[in-house]
Image: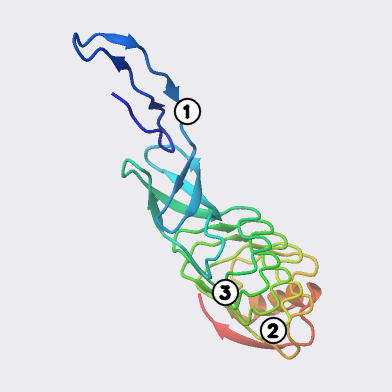
Amino acid sequence: DAKEATALEEGYTGDKVCADCGEVIEKGTSIPATGTTTDEQGNIYTVTSSDQDNLTVEYSITTDADAKSIVIPDTVKDANGVEYKVTRIADKALNGNKKVTTVTIGKNITEIGKNAFMNCSNLKTVTVNSRSITKIGANAFSGDKKLATLDLSKSKVKTIGKNAFSGCKKLKTIKINANKLTTVGKNAFKNVKKNAKITIYAKNEKTYNKAVKKLEKSGAKNVKYAFKKKK
């Protein structure tokens, strides 16, 4: 009757049973639920909601120290095959990782945590498949000196934290949907590449102009802005 612990359910070490008579000699003990699950690539996820109608996890870290490509999936299953949506990238998830060069963000991500990809010195490409990202935390991509492009045109981001892309010296192509954008933190785009092109997707020019002011205030001054209409 031994049972492995999963993200939500306790496990059990199993009883010791007499081989001859079948009686229990010693009762087993409970194994606490792990609160985490791991995929085949060695990525660890932490449970953020155990509501059976809304099982969710956040991407926490990779155990593969040499991984160059990180794929954050739409969903992940635990040892019992229970499926969870991956909705968040944890604070400091890959902070300081020197190996990773590409990151793919799944369609269910709604938030990128603080310092999540800070100082990933070889990170060049981030592919965003989510249309649901509303918040990018402080220092999320700060110091990623090789990051060249950023496309957030599919997501209606509300908040970009302070220093989120500060020091991304090669960041030359940026696309942002500004229709829900309310906050761009201090120095969020400080020291991006000179003459970088920032395309702002907005429902009208008034929304576009407000976004430009927010981005300029955050440090994106020596850049070229372009307006693209999008409801």
Q: Which residue occupies the foreground of this view, 44 or 170?
A: 44
- Label 2 element class: loop
Q: Is residue 52 left or right of residue 48?
A: left
In the displayed structure, would residue 197 be above or below residue 213?
below
Tell me which amino acid carries mark 1. Pro
Q: Is residue 227 left or right of residue 2?
A: right
Residue 30: % across, % down: 43, 22
Task: Check whether the beta carbons of the residues at disc 3 and disc 2 lie within 8 A of each other.
Answer: no
- Disc 3 versus disc 2: nearer the observer: 3
Tell me which amino acid carries mark 3. Thr
Q: How many marks?
A: 3
Q: Which residue occupies the foreground of this view, 114 or 62?
A: 62
In the displayed structure, would residue 129 be above or below residue 45?
below
Instruction: Check disc 3 and report the residue beneath it.
Output: 101
Instruction: Check disc 2 and report the residue beneath it.
Output: 170
- Label 1 element class: loop
Hey, which quadrant is residue 149 in on the image? bottom right
Tell me which amino acid carries mark 2. Lys
Task: Check whether the beta carbons of the residues at disc 1 and disc 3 lie within 8 A of each other.
Answer: no
- Disc 1 versus disc 2: nearer the observer: 1
Instruction: Check disc 1 and report the residue beneath it.
Output: 32
Crowdedness of circle 2 by 10 Å Cα count: few (<14), some, many (20+)?
Answer: some
Q: Residue at x 36, y 13 (%)?
A: 27
Q: CA distance from mark 3 to mark 2?
A: 14 Å
Quarter of the image with the N terminus in it: top left
Q: CA distance from mark 1 to mark 2?
A: 46 Å
